[in-house]
Image (cartoon, rainbow, N blue to C red):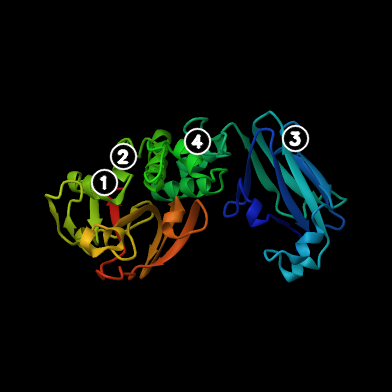
Amino acid sequence: MAHLLKLPNDSAGYDRDAYALTMTKNATSVFYLVASDGLTPKVTAAAGEEASDIVSAAADSKGVAELQTNKYVSEWERGQSLKRIVLRSGGKTGQARLRAQLEDGRDWIKPLPIFVVEDRYGRRGSDTSGVEPEFAKELELLPIRKAIARLAAEQMASKVRTNAEALDAYHHPYPNPPDDKWCGSFVAWCWNLLSKLRKDVPAGLFGSGDPLRSPEKAIDWAVKNSGKFKLLRYEGPNPMTLKEKVAYAEIGADGVTPQCGDVVLWRNKSGFRGDDPAKGVLGFQHVALLESFSGKTFVDINGNAYDADAASPFARIEHDLDSKTTMLKAPRAFFLCVRGL
């Protein structure tokens, strides 16, 4: 079946899950059209009229030969006719669609929505350049917890690729290593932006964002705001004060089970600081957004995903709930659950 192919190493702006492309102004993006014989690629606006002032498309055969040895191209795709499609955005924001049509005008692939936005990082959701109108409507109609996961997932397709870009995009206040751990700032940023779009999302759920800038701060936030949050699977002192004792609460305590939109807090693999027992047991590592939870597995969306052993700045990762630290044999993942949503 004819379809569009986007190579993973050139995927910035392409949201595979939502099947949509977001572009900055005056930019290019390359796709390959598989089973392209008899098909004419073109860009139109939603109603079908030309949209070349927003995005234009040109087709050629450049780079097609190299696809024969690309590991991301299936054997079936290699045997099909292939065309390279170069999309070029202009200086105008707006929405368009990439289509591949037969001579009689019928679409032979699912039209690809294209959004050209002001945001320098190519995000439909931005607190500096605004939220693209259609995306804002989508977020307003979804249940709150689904909306926060959708917003986080959309960020994964952005052009944010370096620590410096992430520190800017998600307003993480620490510009230098080793304090450039922006994972929690990303989660707090998503919640703060959603609260600006929806009246049913509490403003300042995580303050200015600081309470999620480390697992230690998240524990302290939960202790101080126990009516709004439930901490599950953590036992020990409040690491910010070393005074309050946090009692262990297993999943289901007080009727609370981790849900989409809650916060996942991670210990490092050993559970000790610097993997050294002499340095104490508060070996915390990472903050992520919970996307789904079922039985003994869960999936989280990670910013600064290098801290989650991923090879990219963002990653969606499935985990075993029973994963334990190697030395302490304590749960590696524990949860900051938001009550009442």
The mark that comes first in sequence, 3 or 1, is 3
- List x then y, in percent, for residue 300: 42, 57
Tag 2 residue? 210
Residue shown at the point (11%, 49%) measured from the top left: 243
> Which of 26 and 297 lies nearest the eye of the viewer?
26
Estimate the spatial distance between the alpha carbons at disc 4 and disc 2, rounded to whole Å.
19 Å
Q: Are marks 2 and 1 in contact (CB under 8 Å)?
A: yes
Left or right, 271 with respect to 11, comes to: left
Decide: is 60 above or below 91: below
Tag 1 residue? 217
Residue shown at the point (72%, 64%) measured from the top left: 70
The mark that comes first in sequence, 2 or 3, is 3
Q: Are marks 2 and 3 in contact (CB under 8 Å)?
A: no
Give the amino acid at mark 2.
Asp
Quadrant of residue 38 in the image? Answer: bottom right
Quadrant of residue 177 in the image? Answer: top left
The mark that comes first in sequence, 4 or 1, is 4
Which quadrant holds the N terminus?
A: bottom right
Estimate the spatial distance between the alpha carbons at disc 2 and disc 3, rounded to whole Å.
43 Å
- List x then y, in percent, for residue 80: 81, 65
> Which of 174 and 130 lies nearest the eye of the viewer?
174
Tag 3 residue? 51
Q: Nearer the viewer, mark 4 or mark 2?
A: 2
Q: Nearer the viewer, mark 4 or mark 1?
A: 1
Give the amino acid at mark 4.
Ser
Give the amino acid at mark 3.
Ala
Estimate the spatial distance between the alpha carbons at disc 3 and disc 4, rounded to whole Å.
24 Å
Estimate the spatial distance between the alpha carbons at disc 3 and disc 1, rounded to whole Å.
48 Å
Tag 4 residue? 126
Q: Nearer the viewer, mark 2 or mark 3?
A: 2
Q: Secondary structure at mark 2?
A: helix
